[in-house]
Image: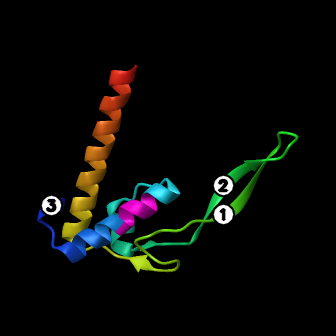
Amino acid sequence: MAYDVLPQASKARVNAVLELGRLLSISYDEKALAAGVVNPGTKTVVRFTKGGKSYRTKEKFEALLSAPGEVVKLDAAEAEAYLGLRRMFDAALDKFRDQTL
């Protein structure tokens, strides 16, 4: 089902998953969407010391559409809409890359 024909509550769930994917740099597959996407409230980031050595640390992030610990599950129509949006975003980024090169 296309995103634009979903009811508002479904759009809100899809938007929450899109936001988490953006914040965590993840694209979810159908299996993950059915199992539920968790807002962990933190993400692992790479930092550098003054000497140039890298280390990993946890950093809090603030999602506006879900709370830390909240699990967002998408039904089949919502998952289809999410995957359609991801394909559209990927195609747009590919086109942008091709045009700038």
Q: Which residue is mark 1?
A: 59
Q: Residue at x 37, y 66 (%)?
A: 17
Q: Amino acid at mark 2?
A: Val
Dot 1 and dot 2 residues touching (CB under 8 Å): yes
Q: Position of residue 40 (x, y in %)?
A: 55, 72
Q: Residue at x 29, y 71 (%)?
A: 12
* Residue 89 visible: yes
Label 1, label 3: how far apart the Cα atoms are = 34 Å
- Would you say residue 101 sits in the magenta stretch? no
Vertical comparison of 25 with 32: above or below:
above
In the rendered structure, which segment of residues is drawn in magenta? 16-21
Q: Which residue is mark 3?
A: 4
Q: Residue at x 68, y 64 (%)?
A: 58
Q: Position of residue 19 (x, y in %)?
A: 41, 62
Type of colouring? rainbow
Q: Position of residue 87 (x, y in %)?
A: 27, 47
Label 3, label 2: how far apart the Cα atoms are = 34 Å
* Residue 1 visible: no
Q: Which residue is mark 2?
A: 45
Q: Residues within 10 Å of mark 1 (few under 14, many from 20)?
A: few
Question: Front-most of 31 and 36?
Answer: 36
Mark nearer the N terminus (1 vs 2): 2
Q: Quadrant of the N terminus?
A: bottom left
